[in-house]
Amino acid sequence: MTASASNTLRILTVCSHNRTRSVMMAAMLRSMLAERLGDGSVQIRSSGFGPVDLPAIDDAIDAMRRRGLDVSGHRSSMTTAALVDGADLILTAERDHVVNIAALSPEAFRRTMTLPEFLALAVTGSTDPDLDVRPWVESLTEQRTAGAYLRDAIPEVGDPTGSMPRAFEAAVATIEQQCREVTAHLVRQRL
């Protein structure tokens, strides 16, 4: 199924400062999805809510380098309504990021989930080959209300910034596994 008129799946990854989690999520998803769906089939951007034009942290650069991915040229960017509105799926690290995105663009609330939240919803959601990706993603959250979202426990991606090397690598391995699972769900929906 197509994600847009150009047949490109557009994903935005978001974390607080766009220097660690969202950078790694974007790099891994870009690689995994391109491998499964082909080059040009995926457009992945990352952003945050902190200062702009800062590099990824050294630990993130090193972790991605060990996986054959180069994020050394990354510079942080701000999450904007235009970025959000242009995405078929927005994967965040924390619930607060989902809330901030919904404040920028209320329509995006249905397409915005934390990374582990998306996985939990995709497992229980249906795969409908007649739906394009964006409507399928929105169907995963159709029962979600803003009030309940603020009250409910929402799984998040912990921030490994400043962690000891072993703890940082464990956090990256978790993000990597979650990205593999996201890839599998998206590939299944697009076929």
Image (tube, grey):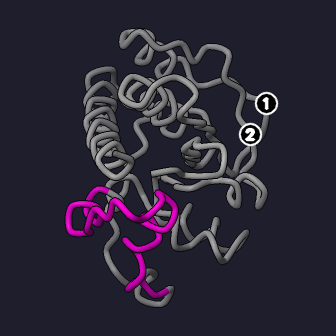
The percent position of residue 75, horizontal first and vertical second, equals: 72, 27
- 87 w.r.t. 24: above or below: below
Q: Residues within 10 Å of mark 2 (few under 14, many from 20)?
A: many
The image shows residue 109, relative to residue 46, as above or below, that is below
- Examine the image and state in which quarter residue 88 appears: bottom right
Find the residue positioned furthest to the left: 124
In the rendered image, which quarter is residue 174 located in?
top left
The residue positioned 66% from the left and 23% from the top of the image is 74
| Quarter of the figure with the C terminus | top left
Q: Amino acid at mark 2?
A: Ser
Across and down, in percent, residue 127 comes to: 28, 62
Q: Residue at the spot x=33%, y=30% of the render?
A: 172
Dot 1 falls on a residue whose secondary structure is loop
Q: Residue at x 51, y 73 (%)?
A: 110
Magenta span of residues: 119-145
- Tell me the CA gap for discs 2 and 1: 6 Å
Q: Amino acid at mark 1?
A: Asp
Q: SS of the residue at dot 2?
A: loop
Out of 143 and 160, give the one closest to the viewer.
143
| Image location (x, y in percent) of residue 106 | 66, 77
Q: Is residue 151 above or below residue 178?
A: below
Q: First in sequence: mark 2 or mark 1?
A: 1
Q: Decide if residue 122 is on the left or right side of residue 144.
A: left
Disc 1 target residue: 53
Please name the residue that numbered disc 2 is placed on.
Answer: 77
State whether residue 181 is above or below residue 141.
Answer: above
- Magenta run includes residue 21: no
